[in-house]
Amino acid sequence: MSLIASGLDTAAPEYGARRAAMLAKLDDLAAEHAKAVAGGGPKYADRHRERGKLLARERVELLLDPDSPFLELSPLAAWGSDFPVGASVVTGIGVVEGVECVVVANDPTVRGGASNPWTLRKTLRAADIALKNRLPLINLVESGGADLPTQKEIFIPGGQVFRDLTRLSAAGVPTIALVFGTSTAGGAYVPGMSDHVVMVRDRAKVFLGGPPLVKVATGEESDDESLGGALLHARDSGLADHLAADERDALRLGRRIVRRLNWRKLGRAPGPVTAPVYDEDELLGVVPEDLRVPFDPREVIARIVDGSDFDEFKPLYGDSLVTGWAALHGYPIGILANARGVLFGAESQKAAQFIQLADQTRTPLLFLQNTTGYMVGREYERSGIVKHGSMMINAVANSTVPHITIVLGASYGAGNYGMCGRAFDPRFLFAWPSAKSAVMGPAQLAGVLSIVGRAAAESRGQVYDEEGDAAMRAMVESQVEAESLAFFLSGRLYDDGVIDPRDTRTVVGLCLSAINNAAEPAPGGFGVFRM
Ligand code: COA
């Protein structure tokens, strides 16, 4: 047993300051989450209830096993856009009849539950998680279809929702649609493409075109019920497999369907679980407000892994990256964590070797990001930093074990890539509220623009506008700073959510359990290269 020796001084003033700053960020996060939970606001929620309907989150809660966890995904989707936070849909992983499922629930209180560009991205991400991790997908449908004013951005890519449903089914991942209300036009293909369909009597409306469209197209007079009501689909068209008496009955039928999937997880079962020796609560005081101040990621590892037991790999070599083996909720993992921000050649080679070792032993990898990127400068270019960084990025990109990434602090430049950023397809990626990510730091970016602008002016024989330069730098700096923040990035679906540091162990544990629904991925091509 290699117990991490913590050096975190919880009595020190820095600890108190870090903790206070993190708690303030968590208050902001709670306020943003509350917006997503409020959906379309009291007016639309009250109207929805007066119609005798359950809210999206109430439907999810009644579908899931009592007292089981729900790992909500992308709750901040659409943050910073013209659309309401949450993007009119609730997605997440929950347990139904003991089976981990991806649940996608339209929120009909937000603009009729219509899909805007962020709804689409969130829905597609949920389907991607279902496919990669082999999790049954349950759609709780009630939506006005495409958000018509933004149709140009969603109509063509939106076909992927239906493509994904049928590809999931082809891959042996069951898909279930419980239809609570409107599911028209393209939306009709959600039940159309699902393996199992339940419709609520007198409520579900599933048709390609509603009565007004039919009247215009063919002159035929119709009404919702005769055109696409639940009874019609259960008795005449056969699109519905089950007719539910009401919403609760539909959820009960949904649970019954899952029970009969005879589901078996194909991955690894967890070993015995031990709690970390150190208190998870102390994670609040680890990350400094100023990300230029380094912190020891072992303090994080000590508070998330089983027994705070961590076998470090190459501790003396490339020591600004910590690598090593641990278990989390009984699942073995390899961890890569930035210690001092910058990645040098040695760190890159150590990472590449470590990733190959994890691939060899089929051990999933956890990346804890706090990096300003790969080291620049004449000496480093000369000694091959591009080659070494490329080795690490190659290893991350081609390693076939599941990856999970948590952005603790900085995530700048190609460091984001080498440490398994979004483009490298980690199975799950979450950020702490302290996370910041961009191509480079705001001041550096503004400085580069200024140097480039000055050189361009000189080459044209012009005098450089120094006043304009100062204004440009200030503007660019504040814009890039705002675009680097966790809420903004989460709003754009560059992560699966911003989490409370104290929940890290639970979230990663839920992810590891979900991942093991799928069979262990096949190993890659080469043996381990000693770097
Ligand atoms: N695109 C953009 N906004 C939409 C929308 C859509 N597809 N569907 C509904 N909305 C908006 C409404 O304009 C309304 O906005 P407002 O409150 O600011 O006036 C809000 O969402 C609520 O709609 P409302 O009609 O009052 O709600 P409802 O619960 O009575 O009915 C629907 C919901 C979905 C049945 C109804 O709005 C509808 O039929 N929408 C059009 C559906 C359609 O034909 N879609 C085709 C897309 S492929």
Image: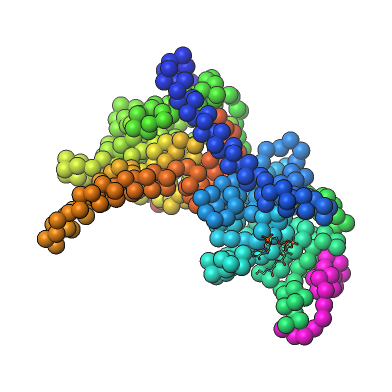
Left or right placement of residue 459 versus residue 475 in this view: left
Asked whether 97 or 25 is in front, the reply is: 25
Tell me which residue sits at (29%, 48%) in the image: 471
Q: What kind of secondary structure does the magenta stretch mostly adopt? A: helix
Q: Position of residue 287 (x, y in %)?
A: 43, 29
- Is residue 223 in the magenta section? yes
Tell me which residue sits at (46%, 14%) in the image: 11
Tell me which residue sits at (59%, 60%) in the image: 116
Q: Position of residue 210 (x, y in %)?
A: 75, 73
- Is residue 438 in the magenta section? no
Q: Quadrant of ligand 1?
A: bottom right
Asked whether 514 or 154 is in front, the reply is: 154
Left or right placement of residue 23 versus residue 115 in this view: left
The answer to whether 124 is drawn above or below residue 211 in the figure is above
Q: Position of residue 284 (x, y in %)?
A: 50, 26
- Can you see residue 522? no
Q: Position of residue 324 (x, y in %)?
A: 42, 31
Which quadrant holds the C terminus?
top left
Q: Residue furthest bottom?
A: 219
Asked whether 304 or 430 is in front, the reply is: 430
| Magenta span | 217-237
- Can you see residue 116? yes
The answer to whether 29 is drawn above or below residue 160 in the figure is above
Asked whether 259 or 49 is in front, the reply is: 49
